[in-house]
Amino acid sequence: MKAKEKDLREIGEFGLINRIRKWITSSDPALVQGIGDDVAVIKMGAKALLVTTDILIEGIHFDRSWLDPYQLGRKSLAVNLSDIASMGGIPKYFLISIGLPKNLPLSFISSFYLGLKKEAKQFRVELIGGDTSLSQKIVINICLLGEGRKKDLLFRKGARVGDDLFVSGTLGDAALGLKILQEKGKIIGAEGLIKKHLSPCPRVELGQTIAKHHWATAMIDVSDGLLIDTSHLLQESGVGAQVWENRIPLSRLYRKWVHPFLKDFFQLALSGGEDYELLFTAPSEMRERIPYLSRSLKIPITHIGEILPKKEGLHIIREDGKNYSPSRLGFEHFK
């Protein structure tokens, strides 16, 4: 009897990526970093070319009933900017390929590009080309190019046993904002949470400052969720980690609104996505410098954990001192 063939539901998004990584390898000496990080890095003399891409699909990544075209334009570029920020790079140019339904009002497209232009102007990046196509639903794919000095760039690999684990901003706001939109719509008082989901702010300046001063050993942006993105960093670095649950930075709005929507207080802070904060590791001797960095850029940065030997895996320490290994890290496409 023929064995049942595996499908994408069994292996999930990251299982697929790992297989692609095995199927397609590169021996080009100019390729500093390929599959395995959010950004590909190509050596170009003293500098490095940075390349990243993200796709947004209507009905999967956004819903037109609550995300207006201007916000969609800004967010489409912001999620790519966050990838460049996670390496400490400088974003420079982007291309956009967009699939559109033929009955979409021209005013929608105009507003979308106004938002795209606003985000591009804020972060000093230029649109240099792209492609358009007919599509049943809106599909947006941006390819963002950047640059950086190879010796300054940060990768997912590089974390060492004994390093501290830090994260910028607060966690769970965007995921809670999305949950509120899905279940109740735009309710009064929760606008700050909803804004975090609809209009993320990529930490470009923070990433560049950390990289320039060599204050971190590894870095990643929190786009899929704290646990999943921590696990990516640990996998590439070949280490384990512990995270203190009571140190996870939570906003006042998150604390106020989480209980009506979830029984598990920390669930969205641990596994909710789209925070677009920076998660990084740093040697313990940098512990006194990080608060200075936080104050100078007016961005909260919290020490949430510690890097351990690989055999320890990833575990969470509760307030009562008990620890557990999470069985589910967060959302994963196809599963």
Image: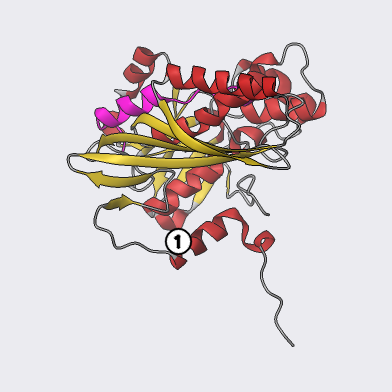
x, y (%) of residue 47?
22, 38
Q: Which residue is mark 1?
A: 21
Q: Quadrant of the C terminus?
A: bottom right
User: In this orientation, which residue lies closer to the viewer: 41 or 224?
Assistant: 41
Residue at 35% x, 48% y is 157
Where residue 318 appears, as percent x and y from the top left, is 58, 37
Q: Quadrant of residue 58?
A: top right
Q: Position of residue 331 (x, y in %)?
A: 64, 45
> Label 1 sits on what residue type?
Arg
User: What residue is at 68 percent from the left and 19 percent from the top?
Assistant: 107
Residue lying farthest right? 184
Q: Which quadrant of the figure contains the N terminus?
A: bottom right
Say left or right for 159 vs 330.
left
Label total for image:
1
Apparent side of residue 222 relative to residue 327 in the rendered image (left or right): left
Magenta part of the chain:
197-218
Q: Is 318 one of the magenta-colored residues? A: no
Residue drawn 34% across the image and 13% down it: 296
Seen from the viewer's position, the closer of residues 71 and 139 is 139
Q: Quadrant of residue 99?
A: top right
- Please, which residue is most extreme toward the bottom here? 1
Identity of the residue drawn at 25% across and 36% down: 152
Vertical side of 251 occupied by 167: above or below: below
* Quarter of the rendering containing residue 246: top right
